[in-house]
Image (spheres, helix red, strand yellow):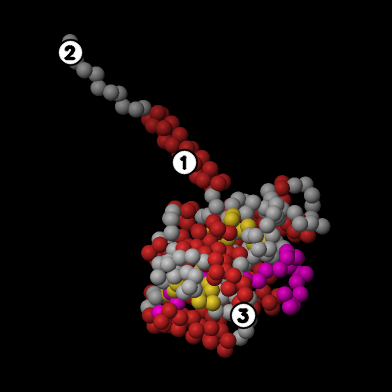
């Protein structure tokens, strides 16, 4: 009789099934992303470096003679930054400078030897020199990268000398340098501190108690500094890397010797993500493969579970470190060997 049949609406059960499948697919996608990620989701979502935030800016890097600091210098030079590179070893800084290429490198790269434990007068002099470089342009980015780390040991088996050395370099030095530099930034109404912290500053790190304590202290100071000065133009980016692979022996912060059994993010990738974080103005970022990244998420968002997990593996991790084994392996959780 010429009538047409309209499409039947989807039944409620079918709609539920479709939404359930979409939900499960999204969960699987997030899981796969987490498994393969080498950084937190916010960091990875930013994509690439914003070159315009770096080009022609004055960037001062401590610990620039090796490891992450050296690679940061190379990448920042290629992005057109005006570099000031610091470390204790001037000869190594000369070596790094000779390898730099970019709009202002190597000829305009300034070498500023620096010992973070040398006292406030010496640090004040270094700040005055840094501020005077490049026709008195002033420091735009201060990258606190220098760090002191000793081989893993138990929390109770730490010499006083090592305790003081760790806090002098990792905490007191960067804080003193910041106190001396920040007033100049405030007068200009802009400045950005990039702080190379550690995953050990976000979660328990069995075998690294003093190093972990120094990084927790660093995080506390710089997050508070940002809260106080953010509206006056001062930015802070805290970078928390997990295990990083470097070819220069024990590197700054979280690196250990090349060829170690842990799966490690490359120094180049860590530096790249650090610059991505800084140029996008992120306040804190995490850089690591699994399982460290998952532990950081657990401790941050499900602390009861995260701390239970670390308590379970803590003793075994110290043993693994003593035997030069993999201190980031899942076998620490599932292995049958009991800690002494």
Q: Residue furthest left?
A: 2
Near mark 1 (Cα within 10 A), the count class, few <14, some 14-19 or many ≥20, is few
Q: Which mark is residue 2?
A: 2
Q: Quadrant of residue 323?
A: bottom right
Q: Residue furthest top?
A: 1
| Left or right of residue 107, residue 250 in this image | right
The picture places residue 260, in percent across and down from the top left corner, at 70, 55
Camera-near label (2 vs 1) is 1
What residue do we see at 48% from left, 73% from top? Answer: 107
Closer to the camera in the image, 77 or 47:
77
Near mark 2 (Cα within 10 A), the count class, few <14, some 14-19 or many ≥20, is few
Camera-near label (3 vs 1) is 3
Identify the mark nearer the N-term, 3 or 2. Answer: 2
The picture places residue 209, in percent across and down from the top left corner, at 69, 67
Q: Is residue 182 above or below residue 298?
A: below
Q: Is residue 114 above or below residue 318?
A: below
Question: Helix or strand or loop: what does disc 3 sit on?
Answer: loop
Majority secondary structure in the magenta region: loop
Separation of residues labelled 3 and 2 (CA atoms): 92 Å
User: On the rendered image, what quadrant is the N terminus found in?
Assistant: top left
Question: Helix or strand or loop: what does disc 1 sit on?
Answer: helix
What residue do we see at 56% from left, 46% from top? Answer: 35
| Left or right of residue 280, residue 312 in this image | right
**Residue at mark 3:** 115
Q: Which residues are magenta?
A: 137-162
**Residue at mark 1:** 26
Separation of residues labelled 3 and 1 (CA atoms): 50 Å
């Amino acid at each position: 009789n010429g009538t047409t049949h309209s499409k039947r609406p989807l039944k409620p059960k079918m709609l539920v099934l479709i939404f359930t499948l979409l939900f499960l697919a999204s969960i699987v996608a997030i899981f796969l992303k987490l498994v393969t990620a080498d950084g937190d989701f916010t960091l990875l979502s930013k994509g690439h470096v914003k070159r315009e935030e770096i080009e022609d800016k004055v960037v001062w890097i401590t610990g620039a003679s090796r490891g992450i600091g050296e690679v940061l210098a190379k990448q920042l030079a290629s992005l057109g930054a005006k570099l000031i590179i610091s470390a204790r070893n001037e000869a190594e800084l000369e070596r790094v400078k000779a390898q730099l290429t970019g709009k202002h490198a190597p000829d305009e790269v300034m070498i500023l030897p620096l010992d973070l434990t040398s006292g406030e007068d010496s640090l004040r002099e270094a700040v005055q020199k840094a501020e005077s470089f490049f026709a008195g342009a002033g420091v735009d980015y201060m990258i606190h990268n220098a760090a002191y780390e000793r081989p893993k040991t138990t929390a109770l088996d730490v010499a006083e000398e090592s305790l003081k050395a760790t806090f002098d370099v990792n905490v007191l030095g960067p804080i003193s340098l910041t106190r001396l530099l920040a007033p100049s930034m405030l007068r200009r109404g802009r400045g950005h501190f990039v702080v190379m912290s550690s995953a050990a500053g976000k979660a328990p790190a069995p075998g690294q108690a003093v190093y972990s304590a120094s990084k927790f202290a660093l995080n506390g100071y710089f997050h508070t500094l940002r809260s106080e000065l953010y509206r006056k133009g001062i930015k802070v980016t805290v970078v928390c890397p997990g295990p990083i692979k470097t070819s220069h022996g024990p590197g700054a912060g979280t690196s250990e010797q090349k060829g170690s059994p842990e799966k490690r993010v490359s120094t180049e990738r860590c530096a790249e993500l650090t610059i991505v974080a800084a140029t996008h103005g992120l306040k804190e970022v995490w850089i690591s493969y699994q399982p460290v990244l998952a532990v950081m998420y657990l401790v941050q968002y499900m602390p009861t579970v995260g701390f239970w997990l670390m308590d379970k593996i803590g003793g075994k991790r110290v043993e693994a470190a003593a035997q030069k084994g993999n201190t980031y392996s899942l076998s620490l959780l599932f292995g049958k060997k009991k800690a002494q």
